[in-house]
Structures are given as C-alpha cells and as structure tokens.
Amino acid sequence: MHRILWVVVAIAFVVGLVVPSGSDSGERQEECAPRDARVVAPYAVSGYWVIPRADPCVTRRMVEAIHAIGGDTLVTFGPRFSVGQDPGCLMDGRPCAEVPGKEIRQVYTYATSEEFGAGLLRCPGLDRRAESDGRIFYRVSLAASCDDPVHDLVIVSTDGDGVGNLMREAAVYGMAVYPGLPAAPQLAGKPWEPDLAHTGALNAFTARVLADYRTRFGASFAGVYQSFELAMRDRGSKDPIIELYEAQHAVVASALPGKKILVSPYIDARRGRGFPPSQAPEGLADIAATRAGLPMAVAVQDGRGTGKVPVYGINERDAKVEARLVPVVGEVTYGQAYYGSTRDYIETAARRVPSGVELWVNVEGFEPSPVEGECGRVEPLPLRGRTSKSRLDRQVMAVGTQATKIISYGWEPFFTCQDRYDTPSLADDIANGWQQPIIVSATRKEMNGRPGVLVEGYHLRGGTLRFDPQGVAVDQEWYGRGRLDSAWVPYVPTAPWTSITATNEAGQTSTSPYVMP
C-alpha cells in the first residue's frame, strides 16, 4: 500500500520517461499502468481538493490513491476569469484579441487545465481554437449574436485536458467530480470581494462552459464548486459576494438542472478579528438562499489549518494553545484567543440547516506554517506545513455527528509530500493507520434497563473502551453500524471530565481520547 500512495509523488518523473510527448489522452492512457480499484484503507475523510493534471497517467495514479483510502469525491478550484490580454496568443500572425472587421470592447483571459469541445465555439471564424507558443488557446466571443459589431472576448489558455482526465478516471471508480466554476474577477484594492462590474461577462462565459460540460461529461459530473470564498457569518444586506453567488448560481440552475452546487465558506473564531458561533446559522442561511432551487452542499472549512479556529476538548478552554497555533494567536489560552472551537461552530450551524442543503465539513489538512525539515506548500503564499494523522483524527472528532460528509483541502501537496524521500507521506500514514478508531460522540444511555455509555465514530467494532482518570477498561456489549459506528458499554463515569479511548477488535487504539462531561 505504501508503494501505491508513494508513486503519486514520483509518477510525474516516471511518466516523463515512458510516455512520448505529443500523444493524445487516449494513446497515453493505453500506456498507463493498470488500475487498482480496491478500497484498502477507508478513512473518515471521503473527498479531496485536487489539481487537474494534463498527464492521464499522473491523474490515474492520483485518483487510484485517493480511492484506495476511501475517497469518492474530487473537487477542483475554478480558474480566475480576469480582465486583460494574453500576449502569447497569436492567430494568423496577429494577437488573438485583434479581429478584422470587429470592434473589441473588452478582453478577458482564462488560464485553465482543461480542453473544451466544439460546443464552446459558436461563431465561425471568430470563435476559434489554435495552438500558439506551445499552448492551446480558445478565442470566445461573449456577444449575444455573432453578427454584433461589438464583441467582448475571452482568451482561454490551457496546458491540457486535466479536468477531462479527472472525469474519465472518476467514472471508472464510481467517484463524483465537482469542477470549479469560473472564479469572478477580484475588486482592485479589495481582492476578497468580486468586481461586480464584470458579472454579466462572467455569467455569459459560465453559461458557455457549463453547456460544454453538459454535453461532454457523464455520471461522474456531480455538480460544480463555487470558488469565490466567503465567511459563514451574518452577511448583512447588499453583500457583493452574495450578489455574485445569486447571479452565477442562477446560470448553473439554467444550464445544469438537478446538479449540486458545492460551497466551502470559512469560519474565524479569533477574538477581535472573527465572529462567534452564534453567527454561523445566519451565514449558512444567506448562502443557502443563493442555491436557485438546486441542491447545495456547504462544506464548512474547519479553520484548524489556517489557525483561525482550534480543535480542543471541552475541558481545555483554559489550557494554553498548542504550539502550532502560537504564531497565529500568541502564547495564550484557547479561551483568551478564540470564541470557540470547530465543534461549537458546526453544532450551532447544524441546528438550523436550511431545506435543500447538506452540511459537510472541510477539514484543513495542513498547518498554519511549516517547521524546519517539514514539507508543505511553498506557493502560492503563505507557506503552509503538513500535518499528522493524529491531528487529522482530532479534526474529525471535532466535526462530531452533524456533518453528512467530510472532505479536505488539499490532496497535493499536503497528503502526498514527504519530509525526506524515505519518510511516509500523510496519505501513507492514513493507509497504515486507517483502522485506528475515532470517537466523535459519547453520551450516557441505558440499554435493557442498564446504565452505560454509547459512543459513535469510526472503526469502533469490538474491543474495549477505556475511561480515565478512573483507569477502567470495559468490554463492548453492543455494536451497531449506520452512517457512523456505535458501541455501548455498561459503565457510569463519575469524574467531572472523563476521557474515553477506544481499542477495537483489530487491536488498534484511538490516537486521541474523547472527553465527555
């Protein structure tokens, strides 16, 4: 299993040796290693943000590795729809933005990792596909009619059909793909806001892209991801990001009836900069109101990777924050630094999930900054470090029972990088420790008239539950399997705070205890 996952990191080099450049995707796929469709290490996280790759063999190994640890969902970021020209694009010896006999009012660029079908090109002679400077370009007019004297143009550039490769591989494994919608231009001086002056052009281009998707993609095309980020708090009136969502999601509803919209808002628990958990339901309702009648999944960023939100036990509010959070909030207690934990925000939001919306959680698979000798992200800034499986387990614990699905940003580089060539990646650690139980909930419950404790979580079958500080280990007497595992033992905790550690029938023990009052 270690070899299967490690090869994702190394395969780009190997493929470069064995696959001739210039081959089309079909020919290159024939030269890829055979697929391994087994799920050998199912983990609690079942979806990942991925980077589309032009090489189909690299894509195959990546999808295979994600599927092997229980992944069934792939998400990509949408490229930025930007104002400006691409000087590298030439058609008939002239810049692509120059069209004889036509007045060009505005030019946009769109640098992506996908190739489009003929359906994107509507106006003969004006809309064109060309190769220039070693890249593939598409020139697309956004005019209502091909005969209009004035046109806005989009110059699309691509390095290959990465999104198409993802769709093809996902279909083989029965996985779902959510490609990113074209991301709105950012407002000058306020990059966290969209420039709504270009919403009309963005929507026209979005409609063309989605019409092409509808024609070319099959069952693996589950919906689209809204790439423009916002905070899940009370948005107030006339919010520019909500206005963007309303406009672009209406286009999605028209082009892709029945498809799901995925949104991943962030939460920020830092005192003085963020907002309390009580605002999360209002933010969720504001986002849900933009779904234009489509089903929507809201995958709340848990905030631990950026350090904006901590994960800690209910008995740790007055404890000092862990070392990886000190660069973000200083050497203070959790209560001094934050309004609450991830669990507080998710539980509060879960009480008021709007109709037509699924509550997911995006557990951030990285650390706020790297430490010496640790791999991670070097670009784009800020630098981020890789995390550990035990830290990821604690994030899953903090999600609790409320979310219907857990996904994570992001597969590359955080799950695939290695501190050294001979050390495991995070994906390897998951593959090696996937059977370690994770408790996400514990409650007092009578069964057949006997008092006891019911725990819920992952990989809980068989074995014992250990209760501390009492130091008592009790054998399970009941086990049930639903969306989550459930296990019951006949024991009544007596301490103000009780830590529960599970050991399952495979002999694996949870990496962190669950604390119940």
Image (cartoon, rainbow, N blue to C red):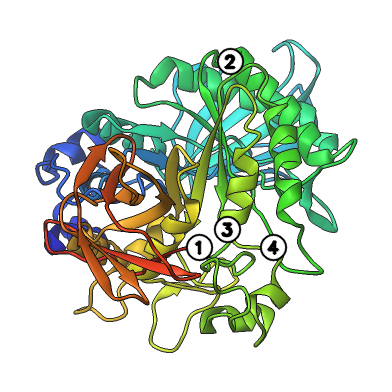
The amino acid beneath tag 3 is Thr
* Residue nearer the viewer, 47 or 60: 47
The amino acid beneath tag 2 is Ala
As measured in the structure, the alpha-carbon distance from the residue carrying label 4 to the one carrying label 2 is 37 Å
Give coordinates of residue 409: x percent, y percent. Answer: 47, 54
**Which element type, helix, strand or loop, lies under badge 3?**
helix
- The residue indicated by pointer 2 is 255
Give coordinates of residue 218: x percent, y percent. Answer: 35, 19
The amino acid beneath tag 1 is Pro
* Residue nearer the viewer, 336 or 384: 336
Q: Nearer the viewer, mark 1 or mark 2?
A: 1
Query: Is residue 88 visible in the rendered structure shown here?
Result: no
Q: Quadrant of residue 216?
A: top left
As measured in the structure, the alpha-carbon distance from the residue carrying label 1 to the one carrying label 2 is 50 Å
Where is 301 relative to 35, above or below?
Answer: below
Q: Are marks 1 and 2 in contact (CB under 8 Å)?
A: no
**Which element type, helix, strand or loop, lies under badge 1?**
loop
Q: In which quarter of the image is residue 499?
A: bottom left
- The residue indicated by pointer 4 is 269
- The residue indicated by pointer 1 is 517
**Which element type, helix, strand or loop, lies under badge 4?**
loop
As measured in the structure, the alpha-carbon distance from the residue carrying label 3 to the one carrying label 2 is 36 Å
Query: Is disc 4 surrounded by few (<14), some (14 to 19) or many (20+) residues within 10 Å?
Result: many
The mark nearer the N terminus, 4 or 3, is: 4
Q: Which mark is residue 342?
A: 3
Query: Is disc 1 surrounded by few (<14), some (14 to 19) or many (20+) residues within 10 Å?
Result: some
Q: Are marks 4 and 3 in contact (CB under 8 Å)?
A: no
**Which element type, helix, strand or loop, lies under badge 2?**
helix
The mark nearer the N terminus, 1 or 2, is: 2
Q: Please name the residue shown 45% across and 37% down the image.
A: 404
